[in-house]
Amino acid sequence: MTNATPPQPGLRGAIDLSSLVQRGPAPTGASAPDAAGAAADGLVFEADDATFGPVVERSRTVPVVVVVWADWNEPSVELVDALAGLVRARAGRLVLAAVDGERSPQVAQALQVQSVPTVVALVAGQPVPLFQGVQPADVIEQVFDQLLALAEQHGVTGTVDAGDGGDAPADAEPAEEPLPPLHQEAFDAISNGDFAAAAQAYRTAIAQDPRDALAVAGLAQANLLGRLQGRTLDEIRSAGAAAPDDLDAQLAVADLDLSGGHVDDAFARLLDLFPKLDQKSRDLVRERLVELFEVVGVDDPRVVAARRRLASLLY
């Protein structure tokens, strides 16, 4: 496998942030469990359904490599150890979160894991598929090189100091380029479930610098989470099924689909509805689509295709 072509990292859709970002802080110090057999520290740690929210937010500062493994699967255990060594060799430019897929079904579902081991990265809160199965070290090194280049394109260039061997990501401060104050304010608000305050912080950041792409994407995500807050999956889907022509109901289902990673379904739902609407409703759908494009990532191929279809419907 040493001559295998390395996978090409690229941003892919939204994680189910509505169920993961609102979780509590990750475990710290001696209470943090070991990842497979690799000693936990600020660079390598274990995460689960309850502690994944801070991991997602940490990816806005430093790329996070997530390996979904199982203790009964020996190749995945060995891969965790191999990844830990390769991540540590990057001197804090990457961190590794090991997730037991059977013990963390929400994370596994959100990352669309089909088998173990699966390796996905997080960059600026967005998933970046890397590879499934075991890969040789030289291929993984190439993937990491590409991941760091992608992260740099999205302004995620911080580093993490492993410190004295105890802190998990929620407490690991970046050695350089900490979050700007308004981004930190938004991060804290999201961690507390206050999406309105997070959105306001991002709006202020955009007003100060309209070119702040991470603030634009963060605002879109905060708005999405705010719309979903307090609503259940069954409630949203039932309302959408009962009223296929009701715009508010279909917008809510599209939000839900996208938050769960069903990007194509979310876009198709709104684009299929678009020709049936009056001009005012079309404007609402267009604005919502533009916002969802930001959540997914404007360079994502599915966004490019949906934007092209939207343009054909507009003109």
Image (spheres, rainbow, N blue to C red):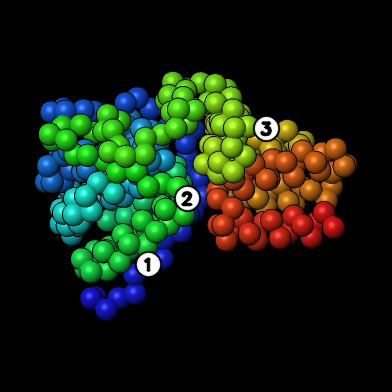
The residue that label 2 is drawn on is 154
* Percent x, y of residue 172: 26, 33
As measured in the structure, the alpha-carbon distance from the residue carrying label 3 to the one carrying label 2 is 37 Å
314 sits to left or right of 197: right
Instruction: Name the quadrant of the C terminus.
Output: bottom right
Q: Which element is circle 2 on?
A: loop
Q: Which element is circle 3 on?
A: helix
Give the total number of marks visible in the rendering. 3
The residue that label 1 is drawn on is 7
Which residue is at 44% across, 42% downward?
125
Q: Farthest right residue?
A: 278
For discs 1 and 2, the disc positioned in front in the rendered view: 2
268 sits to left or right of 311: left
Q: What is the three-letter code of the residue carrying label 2?
A: His
Q: Examine the rendered structure and indicate whether residue 155 appears above or below residue 118.
A: above
Residue 61 found in image quarter: top left
Which residue is at 68% across, 45% downward?
289
* Percent x, y of residue 152: 42, 53
Instruction: Name the quadrant of the N terminus.
Output: bottom left
Which of the two labelled residues, at mark 1 and mark 3, occupies the earlier sequence position? Answer: 1
The residue that label 3 is drawn on is 239
Q: Examine the rendered structure and indicate whether residue 137 appears above or below residue 225.
A: below
Q: Residues within 10 Å of mark 3 (few under 14, many from 20)?
A: some
